[in-house]
């Protein structure tokens, strides 16, 4: 095994798209076509406002993490840049209640005035292929993101995680993130806002 962390190239980003869709099936981004999800991750990896790292075993991406220095700015820029590409997919789903709720979540989350909402930096997503879990890969990816924020003089970042995702919650607690607020999500679900200091 030749496992290492690196910044993803285009081939790695295609693999990130597959991993994202595998683990985050219910999320809004998974409802977009692969080409658009690829663009999202390529923007994250190439922008100076965000970070993306992959763990590869040879040429296979086995895990990744992404984060933005300013989630609101990131979201605004992305929507402005890609609105026309997103529109056909948004329009086909506009009458679905669950879809509207998801959009509302994203918008209200980005404007939330609750504890932790003053923190701009955010972990966007992290995932490790099942067969590679439990080997410290996510911890290393998480720490790489943490260091990148630190180098940019960002002293803390937040993480939003569904309250029902007990295994992810254990993971975030293990890597030193602290629960600061439980916010309303949707369909009677709530989400925890975690905060992690970068030093
Ligand atoms: C959560 C996830 C990223 C963890 O990846 P991982 O590579 O297995 O995690 P690590 O091996 O680095 O574990 C780091 C620590 O968290 C603990 N941990 C990780 N997953 C755990 C689980 N399911 N149950 C209990 N503890 C867990 C480990 O025991 C380890 O603790 P230690 O430092 O005391 O040894 C992975 O399970 C995953 O990809 N899940 C699906 C996607 C997901 O839910 N992402 C988070 C969305 S909010």
Image (tube, helix red, strand yellow):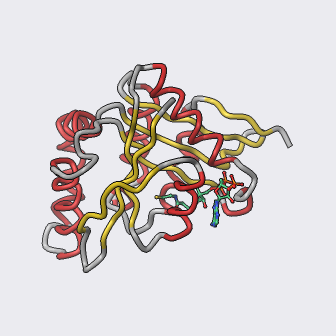
Reply above or below: 129 against 59: below
Q: Position of residue 179 (x, y in %)?
A: 40, 56
Q: Residue at x 36, y 46 (%)?
A: 36
Toward the viewer: 16 or 182? Answer: 182
Ligand 1 image position (quadrant):
bottom right
Q: Residue at x 64, y 30 (%)?
A: 6
Toward the viewer: 72 or 2? Answer: 72
Q: Is residue 181 left or right of residue 77?
A: right
Q: Position of residue 20 (x, y in %)?
A: 49, 55
Q: Residue at x 71, y 49 (%)?
A: 136
Q: Is residue 59 left or right of residue 190?
A: right
Q: Is residue 53 left or right of residue 1?
A: left
Q: Position of residue 196 (x, y in %)?
A: 45, 42
Reply above or below: 16 against 167: above
Q: Residue at x 61, y 39 (%)?
A: 54
Q: Is residue 189 left or right of residue 19?
A: left
Quadrant of the image for the N terminus?
Answer: top right
């Amino acid at each position: 095994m030749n496992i290492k962390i690196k910044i993803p190239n285009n081939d790695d980003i295609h693999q990130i798209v597959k991993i994202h869709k595998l683990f985050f099936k219910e999320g809004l981004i998974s409802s977009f076509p692969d080409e658009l999800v690829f663009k999202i991750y390529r923007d994250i990896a190439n922008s100076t406002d965000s970070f993306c790292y992959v763990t590869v075993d040879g040429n296979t991406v086995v895990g990744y993490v992404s984060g933005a220095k300013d989630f609101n700015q990131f979201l605004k820029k992305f929507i402005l840049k890609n609105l026309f590409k997103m529109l056909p997919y948004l329009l086909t789903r506009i009458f679905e209640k669950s879809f509207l709720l998801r959009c509302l979540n994203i918008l209200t989350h980005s404007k939330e005035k609750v504890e932790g909402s003053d923190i701009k930096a955010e972990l966007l997503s992290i995932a490790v292929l099942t067969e590679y879990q439990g080997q410290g890969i996510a911890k290393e990816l998480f720490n790489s993101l943490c260091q990148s924020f630190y180098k940019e003089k960002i002293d803390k970042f937040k993480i939003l995680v569904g309250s029902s995702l007990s295994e992810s919650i254990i993971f975030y607690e293990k890597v030193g993130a602290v629960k600061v607020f439980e916010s309303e999500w949707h369909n009677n679900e709530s989400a925890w806002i975690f905060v992690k200091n970068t030093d």
